[in-house]
Image: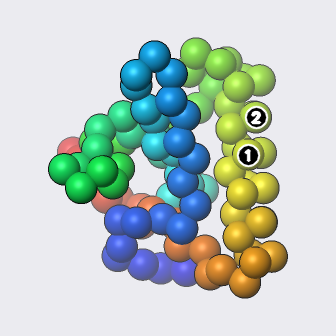
Amino acid sequence: MTTTTATPTVVLLITSGGSTSAIAYEEGGEIIETVDFNDDGTPDWTSGGICDARGGGGQEGFTALAVSLAEAEKNARLLGIDIVRLPEGRLAE
């Protein structure tokens, strides 16, 4: 699905020590994470970066994250929700 929206259907939030990360898939399959939020509380995806196995959780953590996102999208589909992902190329340069 091609979209110009910056609001994905499925977003995982991880909160620890007063800091929150928002994580979602982009259309091309990359996992994007941002720790910045707009004034209205929505994630600021333009400041996000690509998640991969170099993060603090290593390969095991990245795999768990990818499985979690995929299963959350699967659940949404089973509920009849159309999945919208972040558009590719919307990250800040």
Task: Say which mark, if any, is on residue 68.
Answer: 1
Position of residue 38 in the picture relative to residue 43 (left or right):
left
Any part of residue 44 in sight: no
**Amino acid type, label 2:** Ala
Q: Which residue is mark 2?
A: 64
Mark 2 → mark 1, Cα distance in angstroms: 6 Å
Quadrant of the frame with the N terminus: bottom right
Position of residue 9 in the picture relative to residue 21 (left or right):
right
Image: 47 above or below 89: above
Residue at 35% in and 59% down: 89
- Estimate the x, y position of residue 47 in percent, counting from the top left: 28, 42
- Estimate the x, y position of residue 23 in percent, counting from the top left: 51, 44
Quadrant of the frame with the C terminus: top left
Position of residue 11 in the picture relative to residue 35 (left or right):
right
Any part of residue 52 in sight: yes
* Disc 2 element: helix
- Estimate the x, y position of residue 56 in percent, counting from the top left: 58, 15
Q: Are marks 2 and 1 in contact (CB under 8 Å)?
A: yes
Quadrant of res 90? bottom left
